[in-house]
Image (tube, rainbow, N blue to C red):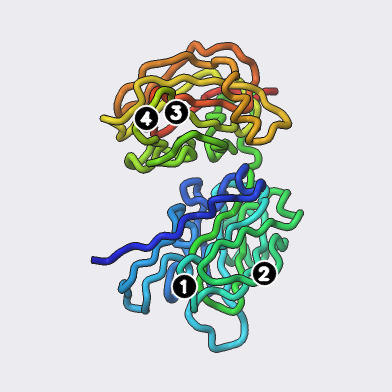
Amino acid sequence: MQQNIIIAPPAELPDWARQATNLADPRLGARALAASDQFFAPLERLLDPAPARFIPGRYDTNGKWMDGWETRRKRVAGHDWSLIRLGRRGEILGFDVDTSHFTGNYAPAIAIEATDAASDDPAALEQAAWTPLLPATDLQGNRHHLLPALAAGRQGWTHLRLHIYPDGGIARLRVYGRPLGALADPAQTYDLVALENGGRALAWNDAHFGAAANLILPGRGVDMGDGWETRRRREPGHDWCILALGAPGIIEAVEVDTAHFKGNFPDRCSLQAARVEGATEGSIVAQSMFWPILMGEQPLAMDCIQRFDGLAALGPVTHVRFNILPDGGVSRLRLWGKVAA
């Protein structure tokens, strides 16, 4: 029986990564466009949101199966490259270049450039103006490299060009940044906490079975693993998570989706909210206990979408605390409203 070996993502991320969105997430629309070579492993695996796997004894027609992008051994001058379309146009703060499971075959160095373009055609992108965001940087095998972007990353970018010197493999690429222009019209109703609109999961007391960040992913969850689920609570209290909106806004309606959660959905839920400025993540957790109530306790049902209106008039807010009582799993949370003018 084949066994998958998975290396967990870094437990501690720098500030620029913790408060950012992975713009290279295919669930946001990111795509692999082209590469100079994909002999051992295709470029699209580089963007997989799941941690990279290693399966001992698994081979395909070209050699050892690797979970990432891997080129053949280069026997001529030059280096390999690839083109990636980001899921959302945005500013770029830094990268996680992950070489997990690539030991004797990892790329020795990488450089990354960006452009802001309307076309995904590789021929058109070849003629675009490219700006360096990461200079040529040495890599090591089987590890995460958390690398801040150059100052030019604070502009808006749509595409990346990766250069690996001269060849080899990379397991995953995470592009930490913030979507731009997602919440532009004060008259339009948006999901203010959606990942594609710049929403972020900041803190939670428990995420034993599923990450809190899954709450704000696009679409409905595909299974119970594609939601936020806590362990069974055996002590008094309830579970919670804190989410940051993509921009200050007035929340007018709430949708809670318990898709696939049947014997383990929360009994009730509630929301607190506040406008927070200049606070650290640690202080936000402490303050959130005393935020005003946006939505009082509401009963939940299994495997369905429930909409709640008639919320408290708190004005523009930037953060919410989503409480589930006492524990359980929720697939998605939508906070419909308008951006503060």
Could you classify mark 3 by the number of other residues whose Cα lies within 10 Å: few (under 14), some (14-19), or many (20 or more)?
many
Q: Amino acid at mark 2?
A: Thr
Residue closest to the far right: 151
Q: Is residue 154 visible?
A: yes
Q: Nearer the viewer, residue 153 or 158?
A: 153
Q: Is residue 257 left or right of residue 71?
A: left
Residue closest to the far left: 1
- Residue 232 at x, y percent in the picture: 34, 32
Whole-Å distance between the Cαs marked 1 and 3?
45 Å
As helix, strand or loop, the secondary structure at mark 1 comes to loop
Mark closest to the chain's N terminus, 1 or 3: 1
Mark closest to the chain's N terminus, 2 or 4: 2
Disc assigned to residue 38: 1
Q: Which residue is mark 2?
A: 137
Whole-Å distance between the Cαs marked 1 and 2?
21 Å
Above or below: residue 64 compared with residue 335:
below
Disc assigned to residue 233: 4
Q: Nearer the viewer, residue 108 or 222?
A: 108
> Is the Cβ of the residue at disc 2 closer than 8 Å to that at disc 3?
no
- Residue 321 at x, y percent in the picture: 54, 26
Q: Amino acid at mark 4?
A: Arg
Comparing labels 2 and 4, the label whose residue is closer to the camera: 4
Mark closest to the chain's N terminus, 1 or 2: 1
